[in-house]
Image (spheres, rainbow, N blue to C red):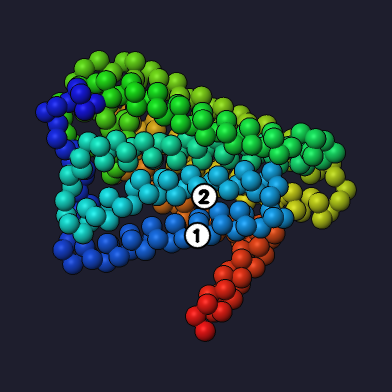
Amino acid sequence: MAANSSSVHFFILPTLGLPSTNIYPAFVFGTLTYLIIVFCNSLLILTIVVTKRLHRPMFLLLVNLPISDILGASGFFPHLVFSILTQNRMISPPACITQAFLIHLYGTGNILVLNAMAYDRYIAICHPLKYNTIMTSNIVIKIILFIWILDFLSIVALFALTLRLKLCRTNIVDMYCNNPSFLKLACGDITVSNIYGVFLSIILMVGSLLTIVYTYAMILRTCVMTNNADAKKKAIQTCGTHLVVYLVLQINTTFTIFSHRFQNVSPFLRRAFGVSILIFPPFLDPIIYGLKTKELKESIMMFLKRVYISLHDLFK
């Protein structure tokens, strides 16, 4: 893009339309939201990393979700709060590309991680006797590597196609930089980029949906057939938590992606859904998993207790 758009020295993001009296409250709110997201997700990561009894497939896959959430939030919030405080809507091409890359990496990564977690629960509940044989440490590591390599390469390919285009406009249509917004700034042929973007979106959305429907249908069938009330309750609670997180992400992502394909969609509605993807999942994921997963909740409390004792001993 830099090579093909030498005349474009900055991009312009939409205004938030905040009155002057609301600038500082909005800045404080945005900064606190970002700090809470980073703190809660970092807490989840650290708890899983330092707690040996959580070094099991379910939690080793789960730890990738807060990592992805931090990437997405870090791509969105820093520039948002800066623009609120300075009332400067301009963003440089390198900053815009970096923001877009992180946000797309986050969106694709979350979908892939949630699908891997659904597969793990499917094996654990529907094939419990084979679980330890199938979900070995090596297999889990390979799944995690596959998620991040596929995520990275698919987004690199997406932006490689976009970066070759010549841009002749500067106004970004969304509240942050993303690939569909870049394509609307291009003045050349965007057919190849559009086809790849649609193909990637359909593969991710449809493939993800089919995986979730199949795994949860099998899980539901197993839960109905089991006579163990405690096992049934635990399975439904664990899978219910996972399903809520998945649906929040899937609905927002699907609407945001395909709203760019239809001209009659309200820009306000598209922007609202686009922003909600970067606020609700990163904010709610650690809370939902931390509160609903009993073992993780206990581990977090123990971790915080150890940190408190260590700090108390250090400063007393």
Which of pointers 2 and 1 lies earlier in the amino acid sequence?
A: 1
Q: Amino acid at mark 2?
A: Pro
Residue 56 % position (x, y): 70, 47
Q: Which residue reaches farthest right?
A: 227
Viewer-closest of 152 and 72: 152
Q: What residue sits right under mark 2 in the picture?
A: 66
Q: Secondary structure at mark 1?
A: helix
Residue 131 % position (x, y): 79, 38
Q: What residue sits right under mark 1 in the picture?
A: 40
Residue 47 % position (x, y): 60, 58
10 Å crowding of disc 2: few (<14), some (14-19), many (20+): many
Q: Residue at x 64, y 37 (%)?
A: 141
Q: Amino acid at mark 1?
A: Cys
Asked if 268 appears above or below 38 in the picture, the reply is above
Instruction: Give the Cα distance between marks 2 and 1.
Output: 9 Å
Residue 198 % position (x, y): 41, 23
Does residue 215 appear in the picture of this structure? no
* Residue 135 falls left or right of residue 3: right
